[in-house]
Amino acid sequence: MFRKILVIVLTALSTVVHAQDGDSLEVHDDWRLEKDDDGVRVYVRWKKNEEGIKTRQLRVEMIVQSSISAVVAVVKDDKYAEEWINRAEEFYNFDIRDDHHWYSYTEFDVPWPLNNQDLVTSNNLIQDKDSKSVNIEIRNDPQKIPVKKHIDRMPGFEG
């Protein structure tokens, strides 16, 4: 087993996973440490999206004793999603093109009086040939499946 650092970058509710060899990752100056609790570090930064709207991004780092392939397997496995996606009411992968490209559906439990929200994403797994780091690029694809009644579709999502 190798020591891996698992980094999750969130834009709105988006998730990107990077698993890299080594004991630490360079944290760029625009990330601000928000919380450091029990080996889990949460960083925050604000970025403008394509529409020029400021959005908050979260970066979560933790060291896990695992291989990159095992981390990716958990991220891609439907049965584990509700354990690592906060407030996930429903999650499933569909239209799996190959090991590197698939689509996901997530419904988030939103407190009353608001409607639950859902998200449909196109996911592309890319491994850097030199560093062996793994990136999962997530793009909103709201037209991929119809909107459910009483569920609000999340717009402008990427990770």
Image (cartoon, rainbow, N blue to C red):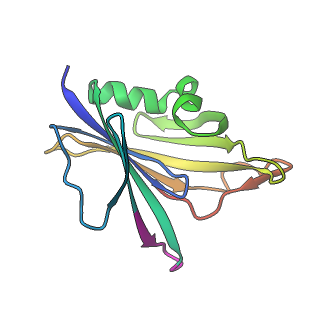
Residue 91 percent across, percent down from the top left: 63, 35
Q: Residue at x 71, y 56 (%)?
A: 153
In this orientation, which residue lies closer to the viewer: 6 or 159? 6
Residue 3 percent across, percent down from the top left: 20, 28
In this orientation, which residue lies closer to the viewer: 126 or 59? 59
Q: Does the magenta stretch include residue 137?
A: no
Tell me the magenta residue range. 45-52
Depicted 23 relative to depicted 144: above or below: above
In the shown orientation, is residue 9 left or right of residue 116?
left
Q: Which residue is drawn at 48% across and 46% down?
A: 123
Q: Which residue is drawn at 41% across and 27% down?
A: 73
Callout count: 0
Q: Which residue is drawn at 69% across and 48% down?
A: 118
Residue 38 percent across, percent down from the top left: 35, 34
In the shown orientation, is residue 4 left or right of residue 90?
left
Name the quarter where the N terminus is drawn: top left
